[in-house]
Amino acid sequence: MNTKKLFLFLILLSLINFSSAQDNGEDEFGAWYMYFGTNRISNNFSIHSEAQFRFYEVTSTFNQLLLRTGLNYHINDKAIATLGYGFISTDGTFEDIPDEENSNEHRIFEQFILKNSVGKFKFEHRYRLEQRFISTQNDDFTEHRARYRLQLTYPINEQWFLNVYDEVFINLQEPIFGQNRLYGAVGYNVKSNFSIQLGYLKNHFTGVNFDRLQLGVIYNTDFRKKEKN
């Protein structure tokens, strides 16, 4: 199967799952539409920009808005440290995670990324700590969480690539297990700083699993002044 057929097969599989889904949060085939950017401002610093729009269904029934930014310090080409902030607004009125409510969350996070390669395979290890300040209709509370993501990227050619990852969420209060995300995607490099990914996410909570189509756009900019010859 060539890359174009693989891309079309993934779209068809998503539509089949969507059309056969039932009308509840767990069985519904939802979607996340995402933008990510690394905006370089100097040799050592860049600004992370991110927006995610999450839906219980592929094109309707809003679930969550996530906006995230951060200051990246590039230690070298293979190590990046980040201090960041996120705002998350969640609509829990559609049946999904048990006992979920409408909520707003302000989140501070600290992150460290390590990269390495083995042949054509590119590995990325992401370690993240989060301090979550959550407000619901009935309560305000703070939670803390640790996350680890192992990501693997394989370039098929100069344009096409495969991307897979697994990420585990560990709460620093009860219950300890938060969630696990398993993801696979086909990506296309439109330009050297602009790529698109279409993938599938299996989001596992204790006793509950959710299927999500993911469409991601990655656009990186460079605001460093070019040196004159």
Image: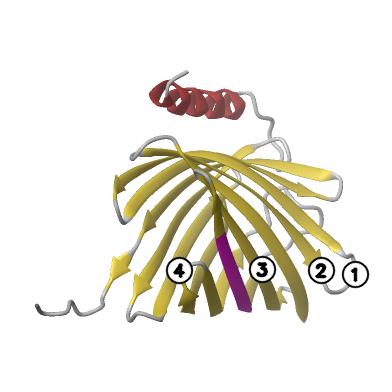
Tag 1: residue type? Glu
Q: Which residue is mark 1?
A: 174
Q: Nearer the viewer, residue 38 or 192?
A: 192
Provide the residue designation for mark 3: 127
The answer to which of marks 2 and 4 sits earlier in the sequence is 4
Closest to the camera, between mark 4 and mark 3, is 4
Image coordinates of residue 73 in percent, x first then y, are: 48, 80
Q: Which is more toward the observer, 160 or 177? A: 160
Q: Which residue is mark 4?
A: 77
Kind of element beneath mark 1? loop
Residue at image coords 53%, 62%: 65
The overriding secondary structure of the stretch rendered in magenta is strand
Label 4 and label 3: CA atoms lie apart by: 17 Å
Measure the C-alpha gap from mark 3 to mark 1: 20 Å
Q: CA distance from mark 2 to mark 3?
A: 14 Å
- The label nearer to you, 4 versus 1, is 4
> CA separation, marks 2 and 4?
30 Å
Q: Would you call the spot at circle 4 few (<14 residues within 10 Å), some (14-19), or many (20 or more)?
A: few
Q: Position of residue 225 (x, y in %)?
A: 20, 80
Q: Is residue 79 left or right of residue 193?
A: right
Q: Are marks 1 and 2 in contact (CB under 8 Å)?
A: yes
Say the numbered circle drawn on residue 70: none
- Dot 2: what SS? strand
- Numbered disc in front, either 3 or 1: 3
Magenta-colored span? 107-115
Where residue 40 appears, x then y in whole percent? 34, 74
Dividing the picture into quadrants, the one containing residue 131 is bottom right
Residue 140 appearing in the image: no
Question: Badge 2 is on which residue?
Answer: 171
